[in-house]
């Protein structure tokens, strides 16, 4: 029974880790694909170098609205959204709460695939105008105005009075940020509000995914030229992020596979030992079976079947335990992404059966090779 328990524990661990890993993979893929794969983000600073900017002379350049306007003229670019982000208290209708304030331009809707629920989004035109308007996320709107109409009402963001011109359609949480609990304002308004002389990010969308590398290279060349020959920024494409994510998940899969292999190896050794001892203890039974006409092949099949039954029992117990633990975790933490594909359950049971066949081959062969007379004499 210890051998069965060992296999059960190993399979349970594999099922649980697989549920977490696969759930995380599906969750992250859903998060990424909500934005589409034909976008890239540009951030100030070069994250793959360790130097201190400005130490050896020269000027550390920042990302500016002029950079964003220059990028817009690159062939293949569809929309460019410079972003200035900060946190401030938003008050209105006698209520208030601290939320993220997202300074952007009208292109943000196209770049990030957002939808407006009521009213209109940020006004078009020169982003430097910095109109005194705001668009509220649906959660923020409910917290401040309840079910009342918020369009045309005023809110105070930090020390700035803004008129509400729109309410966003629900978007939910993306990569840890609740976009339903956000105030959207013109990018220049946000820069004044948070005393910024730069934008923190420039998000870009282009015609289709196949242009990703070309667009990224064109953007890089343009900004290097504008920044005096220095690549003091980082460009991240959605395709690149997905590639890195898949590499991480491949490593997780390899780890789970290693755990499964070790667990099944330990279980196989236990089953082999137990079956080997069992053959020695059942010599008389084997002799009797041979005496009444059982063939060596039938004896071999009998003991091999017993080994497979033991390991499949352990695998089934492990699957049930793993699914049970996953269910408890899902009930205790509904936000944790868990998903167990049926093919993984089938694979676990199949591996258990294969383990039994491998572990039972030598004991079954030993039993089949016993001579009937010697077996009866041994008894």
Image (cartoon, helix red, strand yellow):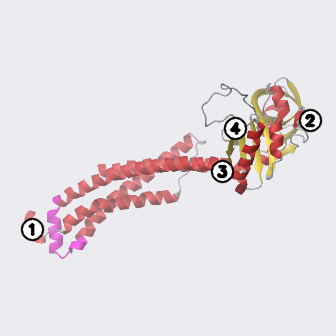
* Residue, disc 3: 239
Which comes sooner in the sequence, label 4 or label 3?
4
The x, y position of residue 116, in whole percent, is 83, 45
The x, y position of residue 19, in whole percent, is 52, 49
| Circle nearer the viewer, 3 or 1 | 3
Q: Where is 70 relative to 278, above or below? A: above
- The local secondary structure at tag 4 comes to loop
- The local secondary structure at tag 3 comes to helix
Disc marking residue 231: 4
Q: For the residue carrying disc 3, how many other residues have a C-alpha within 10 Å: few (<14), some (14-19), or many (20+)?
A: some
The x, y position of residue 119, in whole percent, is 89, 43
Which comes sooner in the sequence, label 3 or label 2?
2
Which comes sooner in the sequence, label 3 or label 1?
3
Relative side of 211 to 186, left or right: left
Disc 4 from disc 2: Cα separation:
44 Å
Predominant secondary structure, magenta span? helix
Q: In percent of the image, x 43 and y 47: which residue is there?
A: 13
Disc 3 from disc 1: Cα separation:
70 Å
Q: In percent of the image, x 66 and y 36: which residue is there?
A: 46
Q: In percent of the image, x 24 and y 64: which residue is there?
A: 364
Which comes sooner in the sequence, label 4 or label 1?
4
* Residue, disc 2: 152
* Residue 24 is at least partly visible in this image: yes
Q: For the residue carrying disc 4, how many other residues have a C-alpha within 10 Å: few (<14), some (14-19), or many (20+)?
A: some
Q: Which segment is the magenta one?
A: 280-298
Relative side of 191 to 246, left or right: right
Disc marking residue 374: 1
- The local secondary structure at tag 1 comes to helix
């Amino acid at each position: 029974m210890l051998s069965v328990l060992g296999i059960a524990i190993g399979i349970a661990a594999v099922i649980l880790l697989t549920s977490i890993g696969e759930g995380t993979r599906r969750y992250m893929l859903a998060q990424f694909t909500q934005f589409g794969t034909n976008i890239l983000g540009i951030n100030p600073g070069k994250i793959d170098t360790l130097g201190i900017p400005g130490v050896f002379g020269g000027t550390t350049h920042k990302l500016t609205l002029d950079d964003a306007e220059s990028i817009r003229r690159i062939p293949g670019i569809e929309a460019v959204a410079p972003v200035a982000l900060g946190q401030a208290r938003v008050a209105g209708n006698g209520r208030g709460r601290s939320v993220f304030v997202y300074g952007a331009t009208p292109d943000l809707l196209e770049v990030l695939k957002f939808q407006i629920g009521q009213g209109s989004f940020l006004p078009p035109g020169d982003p430097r105008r910095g109109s005194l308007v705001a668009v509220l996320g649906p959660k923020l709107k409910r917290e401040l105005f309840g079910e009342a109409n918020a369009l045309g009402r005023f809110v105070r963001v930090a020390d700035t009075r803004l008129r509400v011109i729109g309410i966003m359609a629900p978007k939910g949480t993306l990569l840890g940020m609740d976009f339903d609990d956000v105030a959207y304002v013109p990018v220049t308004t946000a820069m004044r509000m948070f005393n910024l002389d730069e934008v923190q990010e420039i998000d870009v969308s282009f015609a289709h995914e196949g242009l990703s590398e070309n667009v990224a290279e064109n953007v890089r060349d343009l900004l290097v030229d504008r920044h005096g020959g220095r690549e003091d920024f980082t460009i991240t494409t959605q395709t690149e992020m997905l590639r890195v994510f898949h590499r991480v998940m491949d490593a997780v899969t390899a780890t789970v596979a290693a755990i499964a292999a070790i667990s099944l190896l330990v279980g196989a050794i236990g089953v082999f030992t137990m079956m080997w001892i069992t053959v020695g203890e059942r010599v008389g039974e084997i002799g009797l079976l041979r005496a009444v006409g059982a063939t060596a092949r039938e004896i071999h099949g009998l003991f091999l079947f017993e080994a497979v039954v033991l390991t499949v029992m352990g695998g089934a117990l492990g699957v049930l335990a793993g699914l049970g633990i996953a269910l408890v975790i899902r009930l205790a933490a509904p936000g944790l992404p868990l998903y167990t594909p049926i093919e993984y359950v089938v694979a676990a049971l199949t591996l258990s059966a294969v383990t039994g066949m491998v572990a039972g081959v030598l004991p079954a062969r030993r039993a089949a090779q016993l001579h009937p007379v010697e077996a009866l004499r041994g008894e």
